[in-house]
Every structure is written in structure tokens, then in C-alpha cells.
Image (spheres, rainbow, N blue to C red):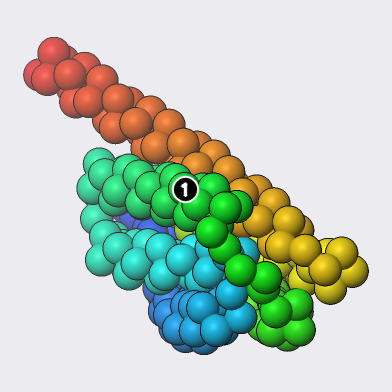
Amino acid sequence: MVCSSCASGKPDPNNSPSWRRALWIALAVNATMFVAEMAAGVAGGSKALQADALDFLGDAANYAISLGVAGMALAWRARAALLKGATLAALGIYVLCATLWAVWHGRMPEAEVMGVVGVAALVANAAVALMLYRFRTGDANMRSVWICSRNDAIGNVAVVLAAAGVFGTGTAWPDLIVAGIMAALGISGGVQIIRQARAELSGGRRANVLQSGAA
């Protein structure tokens, strides 16, 4: 009689068709939005839009990595999560430095461009976040995907608010403040992912040591 409760008999959620399909959709959405938002950010002089576009690029790369390790052992998924966490934190640091530079050397952003593109990005990210919500409690690899989509949706709301602030105040400060907040979110999310991935790697090593000792 086959044991239906054994781990080997259970479907692997990290290699399920629904997980892979969600990743492919998220990858396509993020790659498309990166190109559109970066072009709009440069044309409109908005650091917040450029910061959000870099987030789209980082997420697209992260989804591609997740697809590559789907179905692999936990250790490999945790290593992939480490890479994604480091990438997210690095992008956050870059955005923070670019924002600080823009405080003295930036130009006045175009509020109309920020508003229109910010709303479009919010719709795209909200749809992706809702699609990935069911995977938020998985391992570090799955959780990293959820954190990325959550941060993007929050960032898009902030961009829209920044556009309203720029329009209302006639200054670039709302744009710069939101870019700084998004940078902090990226750094914080990257640290969360790295911590969970390291914990999973440590747990896997301890399990291997115990198994070796028992043998």
C-alpha cells in the first residue's frame, strides 16, 4: 500500500503548473512595464518613476530565476532567494543614491506623465499581486516573489500620490521623497528575503548533519 502522507507522494507546490503560469504572467507584465515606465521616467524627469521602473526590472529578473529553480531542492531555491534578496537590496541602494544626487542636480518632473504612468503601473502590479497572494506563505523563494509584487503595488500608489504632490506644490520634493521611500522598501524587502533564505539554508545543513549522524 502506498503511503499517501509521505513527502515524496505530495505534489511539489514549487513545480506546480499554477505556480509556473503565475510566474510567466508576472515576468511578462514586469518586463513590459519596465520598458514603458523607464522611458516615461526619463522623458518626464521623474526619479520616482525611474525607481519604480528599476523595481520592475529587478522583479522580472527575479521571476525568471524563480522559474529556473522551480521544482529543485530547497537548498537551491534558498540560494536563488539569496540572489534575489541581494539584487532587491542593491537596487534600493542605487535608487537611494540617485535620489540624493537629484536633490541638488535634478529637474522638475512632469506631474501629468507621473500620474498617467503611475496609474497604469498600479493596475498592472495590483493584478500581479492579487494573482501571487496565494503563494505568500511558501518558502523563501515563493515569499520573495510575493514581497516583490507587494512592494511594487505600494510603490505605485506612492508614485500617484507623488504626482499629485508635484502638481499641487510645484516642486520636485514629493517625487524625491517617494523615490527615497521606495528605495527604503527595496532595501527592507531584500533584507527580509536574505534572512529567510539563510535560515532555510542553515536548517537544511542541520538536517543533513543529523541524517549523517544517524547513518
Of residues 195 and 110, which is closer to you in this image?
Answer: 110
Q: Which quarter shows the C terminus?
A: top left
The furthest residue to the right: 168
The furthest residue to the front: 104
Q: Looking at the image, which residue is at 40% across and 37% down? A: 194
Give the residue number, with chain letter if any, for mark 1: 97
Label tally: 1
Of residues 59 and 20, which is closer to you in this image?
Answer: 59
Q: Quadrant of residue 198?
A: top left
Q: Position of residue 123 (x, y in %)?
A: 70, 79
Q: Is residue 36 above or below residue 196?
A: below
Q: Position of residue 166 (x, y in %)?
A: 79, 68
Q: Looking at the image, which residue is at 75% across and 58% down? A: 174
Please give left or right for residue 93 compared with residue 161 in the image.
left
Please give left or right for residue 13 compared with residue 184 in the image.
left
Q: Is residue 171 above or below residue 82?
A: below
